[in-house]
Amino acid sequence: MEKQDFLEKGYFYHIYNRGNNKENLFLEEDNYVYFLNLVSKYLLPVSDIYAYCLLKNHFHILLKIKDDLTVPDEKLHLPFSNLFNTYTKAINKKYNREGSLFKERYKRKRITDEKYLMQNIVYIHLNPIKHRFSEDFQGYFHSSFNALISNKSTKLKRKEVLELFGGKENFIDSHYMKIDN
């Protein structure tokens, strides 16, 4: 794990942020859907999404910046800025609020080894339990866990995630092993 000043092509990153002044980022169900639509619009052109979890007051996204981009590394932050600025403006307008929605600039940790990548995916999916938003991570709807074990169409890198864990059963078991430890 390394912290970088800017994102670089071909690397995995754990992206996360929380609400300013401990405010909620997601106030109703539509907000989660809207945020994910913005993730598709702004982040999918520059990255592949491997896992995510949206909680009321913060979020986690695990992604890999695409290798074949013509955008210089020092400009790769722009789609992220566009995502967060667009979401903030929409929330401010809808709920008649002003100012920053997010605590600060988003945080990112570069992931450079496979074991840490797997640990991060499990950590992200178990976040609803850690923060007491749910007692059952599989029943938490604002996470990528169910999309990754489903056969339904998804924009996530399902095949790559399941292969990383050695298949669907190992993927599921890895989450329960972490709970038991």
Image (cartoon, rainbow, N blue to C red):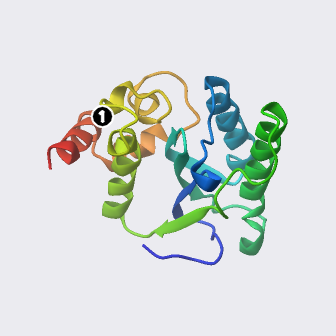
Closer to the camera, 9 or 108? 108
Closer to the camera, 175 or 165? 175
Relative to 33, residue 163 above or below? below
Closer to the camera, 146 or 170? 146
Residue name at image x 52 percent, y 62 percent: 13
Relative to 98, residue 143 above or below? above
In the rendered image, residue 91, in percent from the top left (x then y), is placed at 76, 38
Residue underneath mark 1: 168
Tally of numbered tags: 1
Confirm whether residue 86 shows in the render.
yes
Q: Residues within 10 Å of mark 1 (few under 14, many from 20)?
A: some
Would residue 102 be found to the left or right of residue 93 on screen? Answer: left
Confirm whether residue 11 shows in the render.
no
Residue name at image x 78 percent, y 69 percent: 75
Relative to 9, residue 23 above or below? above
Q: Secondary structure at mark 1?
A: helix
Would residue 63 be found to the left or right of residue 70 on screen? Answer: left
Quadrant housing the N terminus: bottom left
The amino acid at mark 1 is Lys
Closer to the camera, 172 or 67? 172
Would residue 48 be found to the left or right of residue 35 on screen? Answer: left
Residue name at image x 31 percent, y 29 percent: 136
In the rendered image, residue 58, in percent from the top left (x then y), is placed at 54, 47
In the rendered image, residue 86, in percent from the top left (x then y), is placed at 80, 45
Residue 149 in which image quadrant: top left
